[in-house]
Amino acid sequence: MSSVGYLVQWAAVKRAIFALALVALVAGCGKQSYGSKVSAMCEDFAKREAKIGTPRDPTDLAARGDKIVAAYDAAILQPLLRTTPPPEDAAAAARLRQIARQQRDTLRALADAGKKGDVPAVRRLAVRNAQLNGQAGDVARQLGAESCT
């Protein structure tokens, strides 16, 4: 093989290596970008929740519950529904959206139970909310969202 042929072949190999590296980088950035978006959602909700305050009893829950539901819907559920994950994360993202809907509904039921003073329902729903929160945190971390617990 002539030296010119060798240089042309080497240039083609270098272009192929560069193209593969670029594809890997773009794929990695897509996942990181989606995980970062989910993480930002969790951070936003945490800030909103801190401003509202943590309910300490059913009366407090009655006063703050609707605000917590609205904050969750605005910071977590609606952004999850609007954000498109990369294809490799589609199944996990769909699961996270499903859990987020269940958690929003549970938070709504908690707020309603607080308004009614239904302490047994508040206890039961608080346990359910904690379970959903754990499941959501597991899926979010799988997606690369480090701020979601």
Image (tube, rainbow, N blue to C red):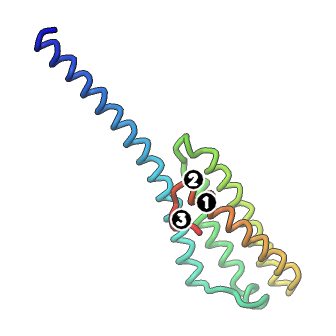
20 relative position to 54: left or right:
left
Determine whether 106 is above or below 91 in the image. Answer: below
Tally of marks: 3
Residue at 68% x, 73% y is 69
**Image quarter for residue 107?**
bottom right
Which residue occupies the foreground of this view, 136 or 48?
136
Residues at marks 1 and 3, CA–CA distance in whole angstroms: 10 Å
Amino acid at pointer 2: Arg
Q: Residues within 10 Å of mark 1 (few under 14, many from 20)?
A: some
Mark 2 vs mark 3: which is more N-terminal? 3
* Residue 122 pos. (x, y %): 82, 80
Whether pointer 2 and pointer 1 mark residues with C-beta atoms closer than 8 Å, the reply is yes
Determine whether 115 is above or below 16 in the image. Answer: below
Residue at 53% x, 60% y is 38
Q: Secondary structure at mark 1?
A: helix
**Image quarter for residue 3?**
top left
Residue at 77% x, 78% y is 111
* Residue 116 pos. (x, y %): 86, 84
Residues at marks 2 and 1, CA–CA distance in whole angstroms: 6 Å
- Residue assigned mark 2: 82
- Residue assigned mark 1: 78
Quarter of the image that includes the N terminus = top left
Quarter of the image that includes the C terminus = bottom right
Q: Residues within 10 Å of mark 2 (few under 14, many from 20)?
A: few
Determine whether 123 is above or below 95 in the image. Answer: below
15 relative position to 146: left or right:
left
Amino acid at pointer 3: Met
Q: Secondary structure at mark 3?
A: helix
Mark 1 vs mark 3: which is more N-terminal? 3
* Residue 74 pos. (x, y %): 60, 67
- Residue assigned mark 3: 41
